[in-house]
Amino acid sequence: MDSLSGLLAFVRAAELRSFVAAGERLGVSASAVGKSVARLEESLGVRLFNRSTRRINLTDEGALFFERCQRIVSEIENAEAEMARISDAPRGKLRVSMPAVGYRMLVPLLSEFTAFYPEVELDVDFNDRIVDLIAEGIDVAVRGGELADSRLMARRLGPFRLILTGAPEYFQRRGMPQRPEDLLNHACLRYRYPGGQQLQAWNLSEGEPVSLRIPVTLSFNSIEALIHAAQEGLGIAYLPDFTLCQPVDARRLVPVLEQHTQEQGFFSALWPSNRHMLPKVRVFVDYLAQHMLPLR
């Protein structure tokens, strides 16, 4: 067996089904990963992958070897993580995934966080796509709703309310709705979940019949697009209340039917459960829990 680096290259390639993706994860070229795997195959005397122009798949022997090697690599990573915990200073690259609208909550906190932890290098992806933390090497993800993946640990960060809102200019033209039924005669801007056609429900206190008949004047798969469309006077949007925390946004959008919109959501920080909580992960999650949604 050539080295532990060859073993790691094999495990990452098997997890991601791609030499290119494995190289990106390990910080080497796809060619280097392929050569490491080839040397490992030569040393073992078996073929570990069936290769095609588009992807790679494990052979029967490769699948058996992968099952054993995955545990070995996991133990090595746990040992490294345990050693890293000895150090009091959080350091290193921290890969974070947040919803696209999350920049409104995170960016105002960065100057203080980076001042406290100058050796932590944040690499943040603002995207509504649901990521696979383990497969994609994400250290922390911030997501709304209930945790569905048993491989992850979670810490609730704080709640938010959903509100109906529109531009003052829109209400001057169309009038202010006084009850949920009035929405049936308004332009309604709807959020469409990424990757499909499902629309976010407007959960109003008047009950299901009104909510199911809310018009779809425009739909977007981006909260940011909804915010801007509402600010431009195109209609009424159903938005998280933290999107109105910035003074400019608060002046350009006016909440309506507040007594009928009591729906709450919450954000949680997620991280892989099969790894020790590194100092950089711990301080970032602690900081978010204390500052991201304060006094809510």
Image (cartoon, rainbow, N blue to C red):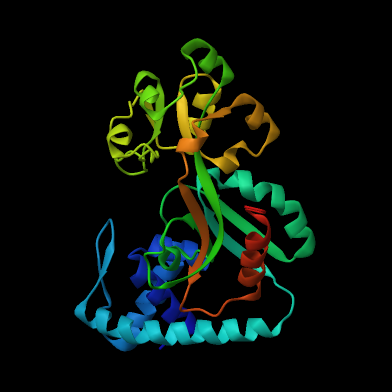
Q: Position of residue 119 (x, y in %)?
A: 73, 66
Report the residue at 52% width, 31% height from top: 227
In the image, farthest residue toward the right: 115
In the image, farthest residue toward the top: 173
Q: Nearer the viewer, residue 149 or 29?
A: 149
Q: Is residue 112 visible?
A: yes
Query: Picture quarter containing residue 57?
Result: bottom left
Q: Nearer the viewer, residue 146 or 30?
A: 146
Report the residue at 64% width, 58% height from top: 122
Residue 239 sits above or below residue 54 on the image? above
Query: Picture quarter containing residue 55?
Result: bottom left
Horizontal side of 296 relative to 195 (left or right) equals: right
Residue 127 sits above or below residue 86 on the image? above
Q: Nearer the viewer, residue 285 or 114?
A: 285
Q: How many marks?
A: 0
Report the residue at 26% width, 84% height from top: 64
Q: Nearer the viewer, residue 110 or 210?
A: 210
Q: Position of residue 133 (x, y in %)?
A: 45, 64
Q: Is residue 3 visible?
A: no
Q: Position of residue 116 (x, y in %)?
A: 78, 63
On-image quarter of the N terminus: bottom left
Horizontal side of 40 relative to 74 (left or right) equals: left
Horizontal side of 143 relative to 294 (left or right) equals: left
Q: Position of residue 209 (x, y in %)?
A: 27, 35
